[in-house]
Image (cartoon, coloured by chain):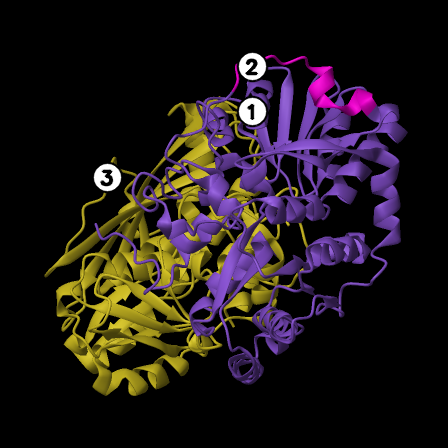
Chain colours: A purple, B yellow
Amino acid sequence: MKHLSEYRDPELVEKYLEEINKTVTRPWSIMEVCGGQTHSLVKHGLIQLLPDNINMIHGPGCPVCVTPLNLIDKAIFLAEDKGVILCSFGDMLRVPGSNKSLLQAKAEGADIRILYSPLEAVSLAQKNPDKEVVFFAVGFETTAPANALSVLRAAELDLPNYSILTSHVLVPPAMKAVMDDPDCRIDSFLAAGHVCTIMGINEYFPIVEKYKIPIVVTGFEPVDLLHGILLTVKQLEKGEAKLENQYTRIVRSEGNKNAMSVIEKTFDIHDREWRGIGTIPDSGYELRTDYKMYDANLKFQIDLPKAIESEICIAGEILKGIKKPHQCPAFGKECTPEMPLGAPMVSSEGACAAYYNFSNIQEAPLPQD
Amino acid sequence: MSTDTKIKMGLQCPMPQLDFEYITLGHGSGGLLTNKLLNSGVFKLFSNPFLDKQHDGAIINTSGELAITTDSFVVSPIFFPGGNIGELSVFGTVNDLAMCGARPKYLTLGFILEEGLTMKEFWDVLVGIKWAAEESGVQIITGDTKVVDKGKGDKVFINTTGVGELLPGASIDQNNIKVGDKIIVSGQVATHGVAIMSVRKGLEFETTIESDTRCLHKMVEGLIEQFGQKVKFLRDPTRGGIGTSLTEMSKSASWGINIHQDNLPTDQQVESACELLGLDPLYVANEGIFLTIVDPDIANEAVNILRQHEYGTHAAIIGEIVEDHPGQAVLFSGIGGKRVINMLIGEQLPRIC
């Protein structure tokens, strides 16, 4: 496929693998931050092609996985209100809440719409003035501009019946939280290419500086990932810690200024709770004071009992890269994509689902029926 | 050529003059309005000795073994690039019969119409059915029409039953499959699903991708005539795509399946659309292709025969039956990695970043 096949070229893949093999002399643990990268590593069977000395650790960059249970319960509570149309990206629907998922609520009659763009939710609000339209605004820096734009559009149209339920999370604070964890055993990061497309790469210099850890901004195709891995291994073997950009065909150092200004206009930075990890300081977006009337959390005062997580799910350890999915006792048994206990088993970008769906035959054999 | 006959048929079958523009609850009452609807053109459109009797059912003469299948069609939207729900219902049913190794003969049609459907839409669906039935060489021998209140259906649902006669020499049975057998796909994967997605509400994107809905039994007949029992298994990978079909096949087997991604025929546009929407072509619905497992001796020749057919130009050997990993289908990626192919859970939901 044009613009894709060249990044899936078997000859280039082999060339990079050879170079990685030649370069690596010791074991290294590399965290790919973004769930999209995890998905690609597993989907293309890259993990088993890498030398044994390279241990890929799957990071917390799956927005669906880190959305707090309590917020999912809130979304379900809102959706079940007859006066509300709840709109969401598709991935959120199967994530289990305390009692049910949005998909179950939909089957029970809640008006829940799967959308590709938050601007469609604004149009829905225009068309349904007698309903409250709530968009479940989940995601990293990548989805923030579109969500912000929907609020700006609603403000422009003076729509009183549109609001967003935000759970916007930010990558750099999560990387810091991973490094600050005493159990952390990560030697380098592949930073999330698409997040950097929006935000640029400057936020990562302080992390490199503070933790003396190589960071390579990396894309999502096999050739990108192997190139990113090679660049980090080269640094690690030389004892260097630099910020490098592998994904130069997409990522500009300064990022996308238009998108950043839309974000800045609409959101400011707050502490945020990450499912499985806990509260990370300054790690999320909330609507600015000027746009508070579009904050569903404030608009609908919802007081729900504190959500209780499954006791056997080890999502937190998975998201911090301390354990791998198949090391969870529930993996493929009590917990499957069909009946997930935790979010990483739900999203196509969740490490557990990626392992379950595309599992490497040796590393994570599936239980036979 | 098929498209030409389709256009011609539309011209030859103009909508009858009716004194109603919309389907109403009365059209399903069995009374005057139902009669008016059927007699205004439906019976004439599908005219054949069985239907012309206008009896409660049809009496058919058959010899030998029969294959019977039933299917329901609820596609949304009912008109999509490359077809409509009417054509789909005929081809879908005919193809199920073909996968049993049978030659499709007769079809029954049950319509569940939603009040408010325009007569024009209903007529276009009917003309689609007529065209597809002629393409497939089947007769519509009996049917039923019911109407539900607005909001209780989605324009048109169609339920079918298909009857076919088993082809001489056909022995389609999973138990015949042996290690070493080859897996062939008759055409490009994922086309139908992407064509439907491209016109789903809220998702419209510009593309020239058209559904590949069509009848497959002539290709199947060609294979069985030539190779008889060496054609061991047939499956049309509709919902759930070829990934689900391959998993189903291997699930309880004493052998495994190897699939080579490089050999999977896919249209470039379809592949790009899948990438954009976060869909895996392995799990996207097909309507115009089938999978077959054949004896290794005849695999190349079988592909050549398929390729001579207008719907089989992209036919290819995509994998083989192996001793390793019994019960699992394994995909060898284009870059040398491998992964297990699992069954699709729920709907394929789009990725969010």
| Residue A188 on image: x %, y % | 61, 62
From the image, state whether disc 3 or disc 1 is nearer to you: 1
Asked if the residue at tag 1 contacts the one at tag 2, i.e. Cβ–Cβ closer than 8 Å, the answer is yes
Residue for point 56% across, 70% down: A222
Distance from disc 3 to disc 2, alpha carbons, whole Å, reads: 58 Å
The type of residue carrying mark 2 is Leu
Of all chains, the one bearing label 2 is A
Front-lying residue, A360 or A109: A360
Distance from disc 3 to disc 1, alpha carbons, whole Å, reads: 57 Å
Residue for point 82% across, 34% down: A268
Q: List the residue tagged with mark 2.
A: A304
Of all chains, the one bearing label 1 is A
SS state under label 3: loop
Q: Is residue B24 left or right of residue B111?
A: right
Which mark sits nearer the N-terminus, 2 or 1? 1
Front-lying residue, A297 or A330: A330
Residue A287, quarter of the rendered image: top right
Does residue A304 belong to the magenta stretch? yes
Residue A7, quarter of the rendered image: bottom right
- Number of numbered markers: 3
Dot 3 alpha-carbon crowd within 10 angstroms: few under 14, some 14 to 19, many 20 or more:
some
| Residue A99 on image: x %, y % | 44, 22
Q: List the residue tagged with mark 3.
A: B57
Where is the N terminus of chain A found, in terms of image quarters?
bottom right
Front-lying residue, B222 or A147: A147
Q: Is residue B142 left or right of residue A320?
A: left
Q: Which residues are magenta?
A: A292-306
Asked if the residue at tag 2 contacts the one at tag 3, i.e. Cβ–Cβ closer than 8 Å, the answer is no
Asked if the residue at tag 1 contacts the one at tag 3, i.e. Cβ–Cβ closer than 8 Å, the answer is no
Of all chains, the one bearing label 3 is B
